[in-house]
Amino acid sequence: MHNYNIKFNTNPSMANITDKLVEKYVSLGENPETYLEGLLHAKPITYWDYVEVDSLLSLQKPRTNFKDESIFIMYHQVTELYLKMMLHELQQIVGNPTPSTKFLTTKLDRLIKYTSMLINSFDIMKVGMDYEDYNTFRKTLTPASGFQSAQFRFIELHCTSLANLISHRFKKGSSKNPDLRECFEHIYWKDAGTDPKTGQKTLTLQLFEDRYLRELTETAKTVMGHTLEDKLAQLPYVPDALRNRLRTFDQLYNIDWPMVHLNTAEHYLDKKGENKEATGGSEWKKYLHPKYQQRKFFPDLWTETEKKNWGINHKNKHYGSIEQTRIDAPTSR
Ligand code: HEM
């Protein structure tokens, strides 16, 4: 038990705090006495209430009895939380009318850290799940797909101008300054949900658009001219330290994550060259490769050669792959 000095007459800082509390409630037009009395009866906050542990742990609702389906759900949920952290950083960038180089560098460091965590942990989707079980339970998930993760799309909208997200199939034909409608008409991710011959949308895409297209369009309107890419254009110059971080983030988000994701998709859907149909019904082998998508947040920071080789000859780094780690190596003790 600490021996705090709580006597107001001998501890001026206690008196100061009480004065400030009284001021706070008076300025709100409230009676301070009621609030201070309320404190007497308030229960102490606990870890489980603050973090909402019980709610969080009750959010896994598998549709089958396969044990690994819970892992599949939880890893997606962990990813969504990381994406939320990223969006949280990006919203602060977009909301800052004149972000300094220092501010942007700090935010970029965080974005890099979060994306690296996602890349380094993606192996859980391979070693954390049984091949046969996944290929059976995934059938109950059709037509749901990670493709329908809206946070991925919101992150893109905060990072770069809409024109950079136009499908490469339309880039040449689109007008010099395409408006919002034209950009959304030809946004790259529609390639995954549209039959190129008939133009017919998959159910996965239809449901996604019904749920999110309006919100996405509104967000695009709000952030137009204020994206991370726009903020860079406001700086007198982009110092090397920031430039390197922007390039790293662009590479991690638009090449390295897509590659670890694609490798996992290949593991389950194309292990024996079967090219199985994905739950979202896309031509996934083609679509998911960064060299097809050509998605870049900061195209001005890459040379023509680098852009041409986007996602080509990509060297798979270690990325904490458990397969490559000697888990049976004797410990030093
Ligand atoms: C066994 C693990 C996984 C497999 C086999 C897989 C497979 C696929 C496939 C085939 C697609 C293409 C769309 C379709 O036709 O469904 C896709 C898209 C996507 N998946 Fe996954 N996925 C896996 C795990 C994840 C995880 C953990 C996430 C994290 C949220 C995720 C997020 C996405 C996203 C964002 C897209 C759209 C990518 C883009 O538009 O560039 N996937 N996935």
Image (cartoon, helix red, strand yellow):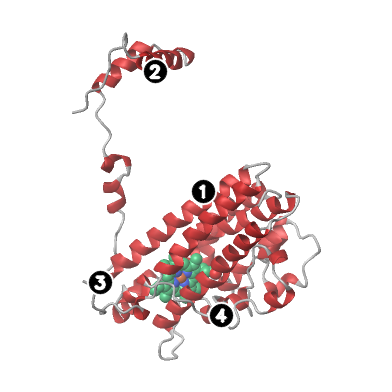
Q: Amino acid at mark 1?
A: His
Tell me how far mark 1 sits from mark 4, CA to CA: 30 Å
The kind of secondary structure element at disc 3 is loop
Quick check: 123 above or below 102? below
Residue 314 image label: 4
Quick check: 200 above or below 275? above
Residue 66 image label: 3
The kind of secondary structure element at disc 4 is loop
Please rate how many residues cluster around mark 2, counting C-alpha atoms within 10 Å: few if below 14, some from 14 to 19, many from 20: few
Some atom of ligand 1 lies within 8 Å of the CB belonging to the residue at label 3: no
Quick check: 97 above or below 11? below
Horizontal placement of 304 versus 59: left or right? right
Mark 3 and 1 residues: CB-CB less than 8 Å, in contact?
Answer: no
Of mark 1 and mark 4, the one earlier in the sequence is 1
Please rate how many residues cluster around mark 1, counting C-alpha atoms within 10 Å: few if below 14, some from 14 to 19, many from 20: few
Horizontal placement of 7 versus 311: left or right? left
Tell me how far mark 3 sits from mark 4, CA to CA: 35 Å
Question: Residue beneath label 2, please?
Answer: 17
Tell me the residue at 58%/68% (across/down).
251
Which callout, 2 or 1, points to the residue nearer the camera? Answer: 2
Looking at the rendering, in which quadrant would you find the C terminus?
Answer: bottom left
Tell me the residue at 43%/57% (across/down).
80
Residue 88 image label: 1
Q: Amino acid at mark 3?
A: Phe
Looking at the rendering, in which quadrant would you find the N terminus?
Answer: top left
Horizontal placement of 132 versus 211: left or right? left
The image quarter in which residue 35 lies:
top left
Of mark 2 and mark 4, the one earlier in the sequence is 2
Some atom of ligand 1 lies within 8 Å of the CB belonging to the residue at label 1: no
Tell me how far mark 3 sits from mark 1, CA to CA: 34 Å
